[in-house]
Amino acid sequence: MAWERRGKNETKARRPDDSTTYKYLHNYINIGIMTRHMKPLRFIDSSQKDLREMPADARYALGVELMIVQYGGEPSDFKPMPSVGAGVYEIRYRDANGAFRVIYAAKFAEAVYVLHAFQKKTQKTPKPDIDLAALRYKKLIGGLK
């Protein structure tokens, strides 16, 4: 995966050509990420539809970050979301089209669950988005018992 430095602690995914993709996948294999078991992605309610409606660059970058999580790695820009639930994180991505977020839970052995995907319009994560992710997390926990 190719990354461009944009500013302090900001990176932007750049869609690589085939040779670059091979080189970076080779690096992941060498450091052991790709040799681990890949957890499946499971989308809760409309989270997959919401992710698919994002611009192509955001969708691509967030998809790569989710793949890294599936292999047991950490995304390049994420933060815990304890207000949603234990073991829930938010992947952050910003480009010229705005700020995009994916809220997920990876603490379960069977899968990585995508709870919510959205575009941020304000500095602070809107309460309705947090509440929706929390509701989906509770639904997930209830379904797993």
Image: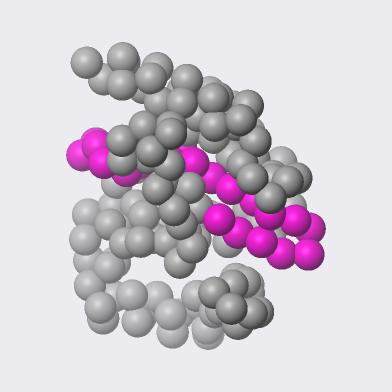
Examine the residues drawn in magenta and state their main secondary structure: strand
- Residue 12 image-quadrant placement: bottom right
Residue 70: where, in percent of width, then height?
34, 52
Quadrant in which the C terminus appears: top left
- Residue at screen point 59% across, 48% down: 101
Q: Is 86 left or right of 123, judged from the image as shown? A: left
Can the viewer see residue 57?
yes
Q: Which residues are magenta?
A: 92-114
Residue 59: where, in percent of width, then height?
63, 53
Residue 7: where, in percent of width, then height?
64, 79
Which color scheme did the rendering employ for the protein?
one colour
**Magenta stretch holds residue 41:** no
User: Against 138, is 2 above or below?
Assistant: below
- Residue 81 image-quadrant placement: top left
Q: Is 13 left or right of 81, judged from the image as shown? A: right
Outermost residue, right side: 97
User: Against 66, is 50 above or below?
Assistant: above
Residue 141: where, in percent of width, then height?
31, 21
- Residue at screen point 53% across, 85% down: 19
Can the viewer see residue 60?
no
Camera-nearest residue between 2 and 127: 127
Could you tell me how many numbered marks the image carries?
0
- Residue 35 image-quadrant placement: bottom left
User: Against 11, is 136 above or below?
Assistant: above
Q: Is 55 left or right of 31, judged from the image as shown? A: right
- Residue at screen point 61% across, 42% down: 125
- Residue at screen point 31% across, 62% down: 73
User: Against 24, is 123 above or below?
Assistant: above
Camera-nearest residue between 95 and 27: 95
